[in-house]
């Protein structure tokens, strides 16, 4: 039985609407491309965020290690030496300015050494990025300081924007420098700005008696 022309036209129209037009295919490909680009961008952003978080965590761990090192090495500091015939025979046990200080203390045994050493904590703004550095060398009697430029830092923390050091006198006033040869400051305060953020203050009580006494309190004064 022969099909009528009308039936053939109906089947032709039905076959035509069952596929996709070129415009529809282009639109679909464009949408898929946009979605893939968005996913790639999100993955890159997530990867960059993870790297920044890892760097921040690592820097925080190094900061805690530096804080522990400072507290341990300042807990047993060489007491100020009396002058001989009115002349000081050695640099002060602790002296410094607003961006670093030196001291003579007992190297903490748990850090792999021992004995009295001279230490230097400094802010190095010459390096890029700027950094906090701690050097140490075996103590030698005499007024000469070690050649710190030839001694590699034992601790180095990068991306330190600024460092502030203050010294608390007996009257609880915070001073910008300390050079007394016959006494130690009550407290040494270290404040750091890292990647634009202010880190928690590190406050250490230098002691020539082997540590702070029972019930000692950290007193914060007007530090600027």
Image: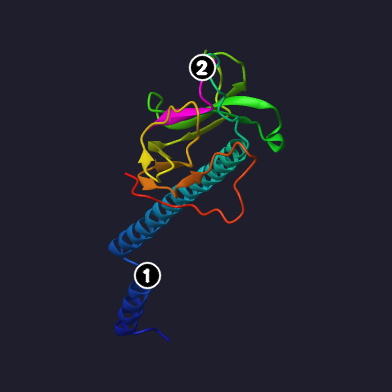
Q: Nearer the viewer, residue 54 or 116?
A: 116
Q: Quadrant of residue 127?
A: top left
Give the labeled residue for mark 2. Answer: 88
Q: Are marks 1 and 2 in contact (CB under 8 Å)?
A: no
Q: Residues within 10 Å of mark 1 (few under 14, many from 20)?
A: few
Range of magenta residues: 86-101
Q: Please tell me whether mark 1 sits on a helix, a strand or a loop.
A: loop
Q: Quadrant of residue 107?
A: top right
| Residue 219 higher or lower than 5, as above or below | above
Give the labeled residue for mark 1. Answer: 19
Q: Main secondary structure of the magenta part?
A: loop
Q: Position of residue 112 (x, y in %)?
A: 71, 32
Horizontal placement of 191 versus 206: left or right? left
Q: In which quadrant is the N terminus drawn?
A: bottom left
Q: Residue at x 56, y 21 (%)?
A: 152
Q: Residue at x 42, y 36 (%)?
A: 159
Q: Position of residue 195 (x, y in %)?
A: 38, 42
Q: Nearer the viewer, residue 42 or 163?
A: 163
Q: Residues within 10 Å of mark 2 (few under 14, many from 20)?
A: some
Q: Which residue is most to the bottom?
A: 1
Q: Is residue 152 visible?
A: yes
On whether residue 87 falls in the magenta region, the answer is yes
């Amino acid at each position: 039985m022969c099909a009528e022309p009308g039936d053939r036209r109906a089947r032709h129209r039905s076959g035509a609407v069952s596929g996709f037009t070129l415009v529809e295919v282009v639109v679909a490909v464009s949408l898929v491309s946009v979605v893939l680009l968005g996913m790639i961008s999100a993955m890159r952003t997530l990867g960059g965020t993870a790297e920044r978080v890892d760097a921040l965590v690592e820097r925080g761990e190094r900061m805690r290690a530096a804080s522990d090192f400072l507290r341990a090495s300042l807990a047993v500091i060489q007491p100020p030496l009396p002058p001989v015939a009115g002349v000081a025979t050695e640099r002060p046990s602790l002296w410094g300015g607003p961006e670093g200080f030196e001291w003579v203390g007992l190297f903490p045994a748990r850090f792999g050494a021992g004995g009295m050493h001279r230490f230097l904590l400094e802010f190095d703004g010459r390096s890029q990025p700027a950094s906090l550095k701690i050097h140490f060398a075996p103590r030698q009697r005499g007024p000469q300081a070690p050649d710190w430029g030839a001694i590699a830092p034992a601790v180095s923390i990068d991306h330190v924007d600024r460092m502030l050091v203050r010294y608390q006198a007996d009257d609880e006033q915070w001073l910008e420098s300390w050079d007394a040869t016959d006494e130690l400051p009550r407290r040494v305060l270290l404040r750091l700005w890292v990647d634009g953020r202010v880190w928690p203050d590190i406050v250490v009580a230098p002691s020539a008696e082997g540590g702070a006494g029972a019930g000692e309190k950290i007193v914060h004064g007007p530090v600027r």
